[in-house]
Image (cartoon, helix red, strand yellow):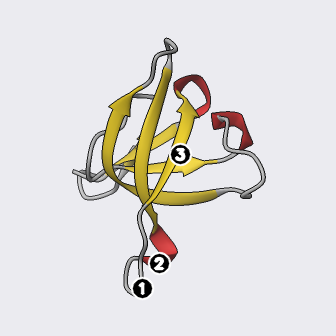
Amino acid sequence: MSKASEPVIRYRTPRAGDQVFLCPAAGVHGRGSFWAMVVSTAPALVPQALYVRVVPVDEIDGAARVQTFYVRLAGLLTRVMS
């Protein structure tokens, strides 16, 4: 059982404030795998795909820069923070 204060990890369309796990399964190749905080999203022309503007979680306290990735929703894990 998860407690109310613990984040829940699930497959769903991310929203601003959620965290996503960017990895090759989500269509992000050549970058490794990492958790990132979603800044904003934009729909893609292809069904079940999305553009996400994110900041890697490791960079949030430092000199964070926003990056945009094209992702497949079928392989994207979303950590709901609220």
Label 2 CA crowd tier, 10 Å (few <14, some 14–19, many 20+):
few
Disc sitting over residue 59 in the figure: 2
Query: Of callouts 3 and 2, which one flags the residue occurring earlier in the amino acid sequence?
Result: 2
- Point out residue 79 in the picture as x, y percentages from the top left corner: 41, 47
Mark 1 and mark 2 residues within 8 Å of each other at the beta carbon: yes
Give SS at disc 3: strand
> In which quarter of the view is residue 33 placed?
bottom right
Image coordinates of residue 50 in percent, x first then y, are 45, 29
Q: Give the tally of numbered discs.
A: 3
Q: What residue is shown at x 52% (from left), y 26% (from top)?
A: 73
Residue 68 visible in the snapshot:
yes
User: Which residue is under mark 3?
Assistant: 69
Amino acid bearing label 3? Phe
Q: Secondary structure at mark 1?
A: loop
- Which mark is drawn over residue 63? 1
* Residue situated furthest top in the rendering: 47
